[in-house]
Amino acid sequence: MARRRLFGTAIVTAVAILSLSAASTAALAASADTTPPSAPRIVYLQGYYCLTLIVGVDRSTDNQTPQSQLTYDVFADGRRIGSMADLGSVSGVWSIQHLTHTGPNTITVKAVGPSTTNLVPGYPC
């Protein structure tokens, strides 16, 4: 009888250890992604009337987020002016943005994963 109890205790202990190991592995897998997506390359950039700007970029890649779930923040002179979502266009990711001032603007685009995406409303003409 003592052997059965000892055997049962050993099984319960082994199951508990495996459960804790699986839980810690899942917790590590769910930890924050610290590797940013690759930098997108601007392939199209055209300014139009009323501060309208059309921006197109190549898709970025990420070690955890699928390409279709990445979004792209657009900056003019270092100030975020909007976001772009990947709508599956063959030509890449593109959107219409609105600049905040006339004259020269330096445009940059940064890819971000879904947990850091914040959409910015457009600016009216």
Image (spheres, rainbow, N blue to C red):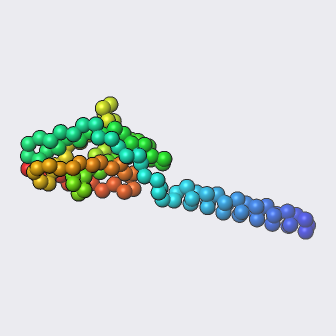
Q: Kindly tell me whether residue 93 is visible in this rendering.
A: no
Q: Measuring from the top left, give residue 69's x and y in whole percent.
A: 39, 45
Identity of the residue drawn at 37% across and 46% down: 39
* Quadrant of the rendered image containing residue 101: bottom left
Identity of the residue drawn at 76% across and 65% down: 13
Identity of the residue drawn at 71% across and 63% down: 16
Identity of the residue drawn at 17% across and 43% down: 53
* Quadrant of the rendered image containing residue 78: bottom left
Q: Is residue 5 above or below residue 115?
A: below
Q: Measuring from the top left, give residue 4's x and y in whole percent.
A: 88, 63
Q: Nearer the viewer, residue 109 or 71?
A: 109
Question: Furthest-top residue in view?
Answer: 90
| Residue 69 relative to residue 23: left or right | left
Q: Measuring from the top left, give residue 64's x and y in whole percent.
A: 48, 48
Q: Measuring from the top left, give residue 92's x and y in whole percent.
A: 32, 35
| Residue 38 relative to residue 6: left or right | left
